[in-house]
Amino acid sequence: MKKLFALFLSLIMVLSLAACGSTPTQSAAPSTAPSAAPSAAQKLIKVGVAQVGHESDWRTASTKSIQTNLSKENGFDLQFVDCDNKPDKQLEAVRNFIQQQVDYIVIDPIVSTGWDTVLTEAQNAKIPVIVLDRTIDDSNKYVTWIGSEFTNEGLAAGAWLKDYAKAKNIDKLNILVIKGTTGSSAEIGRTKGFEKIAKENGWTILDQQDGQFTQEGGAKVMESYCKSYAGKFNVVVCQNDNEAFGAQDAMKAAGVTYGVNGKVILISFDACKAALKQVLEGKINADFQCNPLQGKVLADTIKKLKAGEKVPEKTYMPEPWYVSENILKSITYTNNAGKTVTEDLIQVTQAIADASY
Ligand code: AHR
């Protein structure tokens, strides 16, 4: 009887061990494992981003914002290309994304024209395109745009200069402009806005040359301005902070003083951390922010599109205006939409500079 009971027990153990082993073996079986891995990968949204380049502090912050928000943990498979400010390279990057059949293409267009053919190709491949930061002006074959109102930045800079000159009793303004990359919408908008106010007020714009949005470019243009216009200018407008840093180097070398205690009023755009520190120190008089932290809005927009939700045609980033002195509290001007607006001027503090990008 005992023998029979022992035999019965061993039989039960063998059967239960076999049953226990069946579960992990099945889930780890080659038939299920490979299909589990791709399905997890398939959940990631494949996005190709054709970034302008790496010319400025602004651009570094923009790239970081895109890469942080379009991360794997956030559900994205990001294909990122730095196009090194070469329009041909950017078109090639977009065509590669089409070939790879990514789910979405994001373009920060180096220049605003020359886009319709490649956007038609993306449309034919049924890949939605999102335009980031700068605008595309010769095609509407994209779903949405997220970026800055560059013309308003130029208008605001002009409106500030008008009130500042009045407050300081400066009646003659002779201006030198260091422009950004020719043909980029950032350059086109800032130039258009500032020129409008200059014209309305009879200011003299002595010269406007391309500094490529780089410190090196700004220094080169300013070096030649200091020779050609020695003693003839009292305002320098740089279309981004890195150009302003270069212009400062060239003015220092030529013995030209600038900023709050200098002979030349220095205006800049972007308001990156290093520039706001200079506004705080009075080395840049005013800085009109262009906001590069667009990654979160971009990620949310793609997720909405993926879910079949509607997204706005255009999304403008909020952009404050920063000044060095506590003379003016606000500016009033007619913006690019034809609306008269009054906007605050923010006097930079250490905390504000530290909190910037
Ligand atoms: O398109 C935005 C502009 O491009 C920024 O003002 C400049 O710094 C950048 O290179």
Image (cartoon, rainbow, N blue to C red):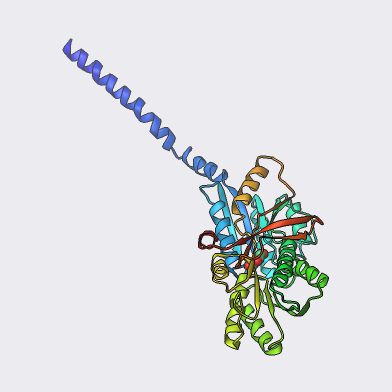
Q: Which residue occupies the foreground of this view, 120 or 292? A: 292
- The location of residue 75, given as percent across then percent down, is 55, 46
Q: Is residue 146 left or right of residue 13?
A: right
Q: Quadrant of the N terminus?
A: top left
Q: Quadrant of residue 272?
A: bottom right
Q: Residue at x 63, y 44 (%)?
A: 303
Q: Which residue occupies the foreground of this view, 306 or 24? A: 306
Give the answer, above or below, for where 70 lies relative to 287.
above
Q: Quadrant of ligand 1?
A: bottom right
Q: Is residue 25 left or right of residue 191?
A: left
- Using the rendered image of the protein, determine whether residue 137 is visible from the camera's viewpoint: yes
Q: Quadrant of the C terminus?
A: bottom right
Query: Looking at the image, which residue sits at the far top?
Result: 1
Q: Residue at x 52, y 42 (%)?
A: 40
- The location of residue 345, given as percent across then percent down, is 65, 60
- The location of residue 246, given as percent across then percent down, is 60, 78
Q: Quadrant of residue 105?
A: bottom right
How many numbered marks have been drawn onto this rendered protein structure?
Answer: 0
- The location of residue 318, given as percent across then percent down, is 65, 54
- Using the rendered image of the protein, determine whether residue 111 is visible from the camera's viewpoint: no
Q: Which residue occupies the foreground of this view, 145 or 57? A: 57
